[in-house]
């Protein structure tokens, strides 16, 4: 398993707009080979920014890398530049290989 996360610093007062953009954007993830799950996470806020993270789970790092090279990826990320005033800097990518997983049951 591989977990891909992007951390976003969002301008105070822009949180609802950021969430709306994510809810309304085209997603091509469910049809991608190796895709397991997606979460948009809202973290702590401060006077400077509110922290968000996108969190995707993949069967493998290779599946994630195939996604990033796909036309579906380009289509899904095509509108990001138009919402530039919401972001306080570029997203910070973090990728993790799962070394242990505990499931219920």
Image: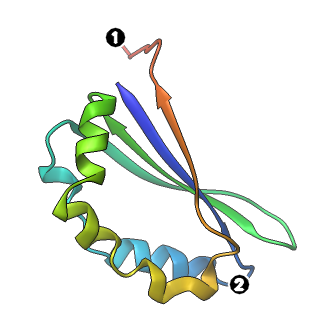
Q: How many marks?
A: 2
Percent x, y of residue 81? 47, 82
Q: Compared with residue 84, is residue 27 higher up or lower down, i.e. above or below? A: above
State the residue position of label 1. Answer: 105
In the current view of this chain or complex, which residue is farthest to the front?
Answer: 69
Q: Nearer the viewer, residue 46 or 85?
A: 85
* Relative height, residue 64 to residue 40 (above, below): above
Q: SS class of the residue under badge 2?
A: loop
The dot on residue 13 is 2
Q: Residue at x 41, y 72 (%)?
A: 22
Q: Nearer the viewer, mark 1 or mark 2?
A: 2
Is disc 2 surrounded by few (<14), some (14 to 19) or many (20+) residues within 10 Å? few
Residue 20 lies, with reference to residue 54, above or below; the image says below
Quadrant containing the N terminus in the rendered view = top left
- Residue 92 marker: none
The percent position of residue 11, horizontal first and vertical second, equals 71, 79
Q: Residues within 10 Å of mark 1 (few under 14, many from 20)?
A: few
State the CA–CA distance, disc 1 to disc 2. Answer: 42 Å
Q: Is residue 56 left or right of residue 91?
A: left
Q: Are dots 1 and 2 in contact, CB under 8 Å?
A: no
């Amino acid at each position: 398993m591989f977990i891909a996360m992007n951390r976003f610093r969002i301008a105070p007062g822009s949180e609802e707009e950021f969430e709306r953009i994510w809810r309304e954007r085209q997603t091509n993830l469910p049809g991608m080979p190796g895709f397991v799950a997606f979460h948009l996470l809202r973290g702590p806020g401060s006077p400077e920014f509110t922290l968000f993270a996108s969190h995707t789970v993949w069967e493998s790092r290779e599946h994630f890398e195939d996604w990033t090279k796909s036309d579906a990826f380009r289509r899904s990320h095509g509108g990001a530049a138009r919402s530039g005033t919401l972001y306080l800097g570029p997203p910070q990518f973090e990728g993790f290989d799962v070394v242990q997983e505990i499931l219920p049951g």
